[in-house]
Amino acid sequence: MVEYNSCQATLKTLYELGIPGKVEEFTGYRILMLLRGRNRSELNLYIGQLTPRQKADPAVRHALDVQRSLSMGNYHALFLLYLNAPNMGAYIMDHFIPRERVKALMVITKAYRTISLSFIQNELGFDDLDSTIKFLEEHKGAHFTNPTSSNSQKIVECRSAVTYLGQVYEEKYRKVWIRGAV
């Protein structure tokens, strides 16, 4: 990410000098990077400077739709946008999708008593059931009512999973605030 940020800064300078390039594509990437870092004030400032023409570009429109889905807590829309990201947007989204998957799982496991593994796979944009299970295991959410069943038949027991998911979210993804630094 350090190299990417360096390239983004260089591109900004080149674009300001009038050198042509994929300005809108990289504008979309910048919005996604700001979402990754949860930098709301800089994000709002940056979006406020965009022209209507820039906002109409597919890459920028996609990034703005991602921003809207995150701000509204619409994980269903977020993961559809992730699976249909233009250009290389999904690679940038890969850096914050795990965090958002845990947040979505916390919502799902609070709303349901049990939920099928295949529903989680489809709703949270996993490629397959194995990667869904791996993610659940890594985030202490792999609590199944029928652990010996085939993956396609597994059911997640939500009550026990929700407690662990909250703990993991706090440990892995909580934003550190530095205030009053001298």
Image (cartoon, grey):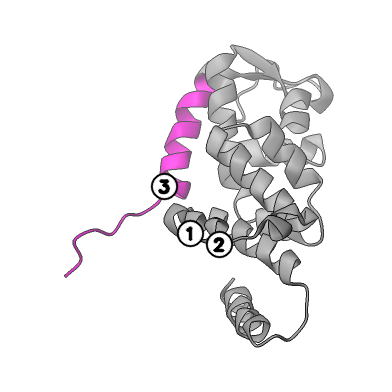
Q: Residue at x 49, y 54 (%)?
A: 44
Give the vertical position of 104 relative to 60 (above or below): above
Q: Which residues are magenta?
A: 160-182
Give the vertical position of 22 relative to 127 (above or below): below
All told, the count of numbered labels is 3
Q: Secondary structure at mark 2?
A: loop
Corner quadrant of residue 80: top right
Residue 74's spot in the image, x, y percent? 62, 31
Label annotation for residue 45? 1
Foreground residue among 136 and 100? 100
Q: Give the overall secondary structure of the magenta segment.
A: helix
Identify the amino acid type marked 1.
Leu
Q: Within the magenta stretch, is there residue 168?
A: yes
Q: Quadrant of the N terminus?
A: bottom right
Q: Secondary structure at mark 3?
A: loop
Q: Are marks 2 and 1 in contact (CB under 8 Å)?
A: yes
Residue 13's spot in the image, x, y percent? 60, 84
Q: Is residue 9 left or right of residue 28?
A: left
Foreground residue among 52 and 9? 52
Q: Going from the N terminus, do you reach mark 3 or mark 1 first?
A: 1
Q: Is residue 47 left or right of residue 176?
A: right
C-alpha span from label 2 to label 1:
7 Å
Corner quadrant of residue 181: bottom left
Q: Going from the N terminus, do you reach mark 3 or mark 2 first?
A: 2
Identify the amino acid type marked 2.
Gln
Q: Is residue 102 left or right of residue 57?
A: left
Foreground residue among 11 and 164? 11
User: Comparing marks 2 and 1, which lies closer to the viewer?
Assistant: 2
Which residue is disc 3 drawn over? 174
Which residue is disc 2 drawn over? 49
